[in-house]
Image: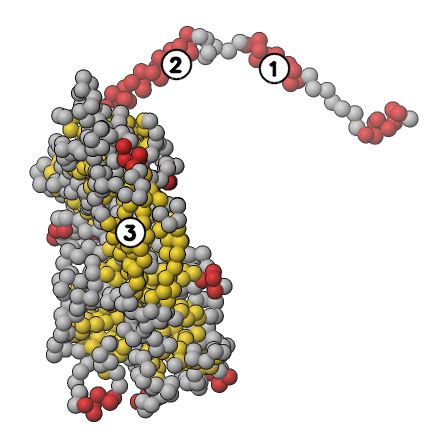
Amino acid sequence: MQLLVGAPREKAFPSQQANRTGGLYSCDITSSNTRCTRVVFDEETDPANESKEDQWMGVTVQSQGPGGSVVTCAHRYEKRLYVNTEQETRDIYGRCYVLSQDLTIKDDTDDGVWSFCAGRPRGHENFGSCQQGVAATFTRDYHYIVFGAPGTYNWKGVVRAELKNNTFYDLGIFDDGPYEVGDENLKDKNLVPVPANSYLGFSLDSGKGIVSQDEMTFVSGAPRANHSGAVVLLKKEKNQKALSLERIFEGEGLASSFGYDVAVVDLNSDGWQDIVVGAPQYFDRSGDIGGAVYIYINQQGKWEGVKPVRLNGTADSMFGLAVENVGDINQDGYPDIAVGAPYDGSGKVYIYHGSESGINTEPAQILDGEKTGTNFFGYSIAGNMDLDKNSYPDIAVGSLSDSVSVFRSRPVISIKKSITVHPDKLDLNKRNSEDPGEIWMDVEACFHYTANPSNLNPRIKINYTFEAEKERKQLNMLSRVLFKDHQSDTFNASTTLNGQNSKKCVTTKLVLQVEFLKEGCGEDNKCHSNLNLQYRFCTREGNEDRFTYLPIEKGMPVLVLKDQKDIALEITVTNNPSDAKNPQKDGEDAYEAKLIATFPDSLTYSAFREMRGYPEKQLTCGANQNGSQAECELGNPFKRNSNVTFYLILSTTKVNVDTTDLDINLRLETTSTQANLTTITASAKVVLELFLSLTGVAKPSQVYFGGNVIGESAMKSEDDIGSLIEYEFRVTNLGRPLKTFGTASLDIQWPKEISNGKWLLYLMKIDSKDLEKVSCQPQNEINSLHLAESHNSRRKREVAEKQITDSKAFSLFSERKYKTLDCNVNARCVDIKCPLKGFDSKASILLRSRLWNSTFVEEYSKMNYLDILVRASISVPAAAKNVKLTNEIAQVRVTVFPAKPVALYTGVPWWIIVVAIFAGILMLALLVFLLWKCGFFKRNKKDHYDATYHKAEIHAQPSDKERLTSDA
């Protein structure tokens, strides 16, 4: 028996002319010293035409089992043309090899190479980045080999199914495929049912009994489709070589990688295949979840309305990176699955058992990489293979630590036990003759085991323990019984089972002390209890044990559910006499007193808190597996005049928009005598309060209009309309995750036209952030004229420059005029509804629009400015009458200014010019008059003569010669 292991980072063969190429190993796991040897193939390289450097051979390995074929792929294999020239090209086609059972290439066609992308149109928008072999598998009828090529058509991705090999021609099968998404002949990217960058073909599986019992269905993951991932069901088209869409499942979490891995398995053994989907990057706001696996249970081929069961991983664990059908490892008749979480500590693999209902949501086993010293344990899983021939499937677990761990399943032995007690009812009048103070009971325990296969009959020894009144001892109360031969309420022993269905029984005697029975009862040794119950609904403050009663409206408690994760039900139970004047009538000890609470689907049991207990605290509570019912032991006995007050803490995570009421059934039980014990229904009304913050902004908040009027028919591009305005409405959830309440919508009052029907704001397109792809309604209001989109915007400067030559005059005294264009007054609006699909904590809706310039030139050129109001609000479905929104309407204001030449369109009147000239002349005359009166124009003659005198007094200076003579 050989185990095949891919090693995509293995060093290259010397002749491959590369450093690392990857490879395939064969490991002999039957010998005690496990050795792995490299399979020799693909060892030659032609550097002029190809490169195998980092081709990742072994990234996919699939086998048909002993005696069958093997496919392994290198999805990064590179084809080259015109090497070492300026025209050199490199295309990452990827390719696969099909090997025979002896791990050699028997198919002479293309030397065993399967590469359907080679020779097709190149470029990433076609087949140039094909990356065939990221996933590859065989159909279970051995008829087809299926390849995934997620890089095709700008990473839309392609799935292709071909006949396994040429031997089918010998069987008379000639024209059966190949079948391909996008059609083998047409190669039409528009036929691919997912958008660009979806990675269709990233994971693969197939089977009959998915949609039809007769037809093969191909299942492929597209982990980046619509930003959250999708799984696509594909079928063969008759008379065409195409795989077409049958159904698509979409991921619920943004960037969750839903569809990273898929598995087809009949978990409930009903003959219809179920689908398991890994979403390793799923997370929630709390940060407690790091990956998820979705279980879709087939409803006889009908998938409409099927709600998956979600299994959650721990934080940052990448739970769901690998999912695998591992066969029926416990031989209970229901296949099981394994889920890899390689970043959960050193890595873990979780084993989940199938069941009649579909899946057991608690892992039956957890394989831990820490125990094997392996990091990133669980990166890949292979199962449903019996390596040691013991009729139990084994599991191989891969890692990123250059090691593979093989876990061999051991036979499962199911031990059945039964206990009978005789008599089943006690008659206190029948005492034991040997000791009248005691009552004896015979206890018999019987054991047998079953195993698979049926001929497995080992002789096994089992140890067992008899323990009486365990719960009473946990409350530090004395046991009322003893095992006669051991004088204790506990003893250990062992016995041997000789084979399957070999029954072995053991017996013992249980001694009941009579004085215990007399406690709290009347002289007739019959206890007449009077248990009564009262309840009140409460809210719990945070994680503290502080509770607040719900308000009462019209006699009904009202739960206003905000961000609380749980609520509480306060319960008080008393056992007092009903008639104080006749206390012997009832109110005696209530033996085996218990409360059974049954919860609706919207609530699950979380915990309990005991606040008060008289005369002693002895309460214990527990719940069934799914938390739908809790049972509280009040005491044994719950004595006369006792009372207890406690809280049942209930999780509200399943409360949704359809939850209008909470009805909890409460039932008291006791083995004492009480006739009036009936079921009480505790009811409360539910109001879901959503804390949503809605804000809006416009970019820019001020725009301008001007220019010439352009008719609607003359417009070809959005630039012809007017200035660009981009609105962004941000929604922030401050409370519970909105996904719990179904789909909410952002409702926008869009001012499309002014009151006379002329365009106001033209809506070009709507996008979103942090949401799944938004689809707003009505669609015909979005780019209704089908104009070409542009990335330019008209700004103030552009409009003003265009208009400066259109007018030569301006006004100094124009009156400031403004108007507000409002849906409620002078604008015609349309209601745009945008579903917030996938909204959790925050999201944005982006609206790209254009101001209709011609309308403003024609209608508002005399205005100084105008305000345009756009309003938005959040709504939930009308049917959700119990949902209360606390958000207010968001209003965004954009101010529109005309360019100056347009707004101030009139010339200066002539009379203003005449008046201005006359006023100027008067002011000048007044100024001259004032200067004249001040004597500014009169000059003093003496000053004139003084100036002349000083000028004449300039003395002549001696020459240099005269100066020298004088000095001598």
In the picture of the structure, the residue carrying the numbered disc 1 is 947
Q: Is residue 824 left or right of residue 227?
A: left
Three-letter residue code for mark 1:
Ala
Residue at mark 3: 443
Q: In this view, does 618 lie above or below 209?
A: above
Q: Are marks 1 and 3 in contact (CB under 8 Å)?
A: no
Q: Can residue 743 be seen in this view?
A: yes
* Image location of residue 821, percent across then percent down: 17, 34
- Helix, strand or loop status at disc 2: helix
Mark 2 Cα-neighbour bin, 10 Å: few <14, some 14–19, many ≥20: few
Task: Examine the rendered structure and indicate whether residue 507 appears above or below residue 565.
Answer: below
Do callouts 2 and 3 mark residues in contact (Cβ within 8 Å)?
A: no
Residue 128 image position (x, y, % from top left): 33, 73
Q: Is residue 732 visible?
A: no
Circle 2 residue:
928
Query: Which residue is more in the foreground, 799 or 109?
Result: 109
Residue placed most toward the observer, 8 or 570: 570
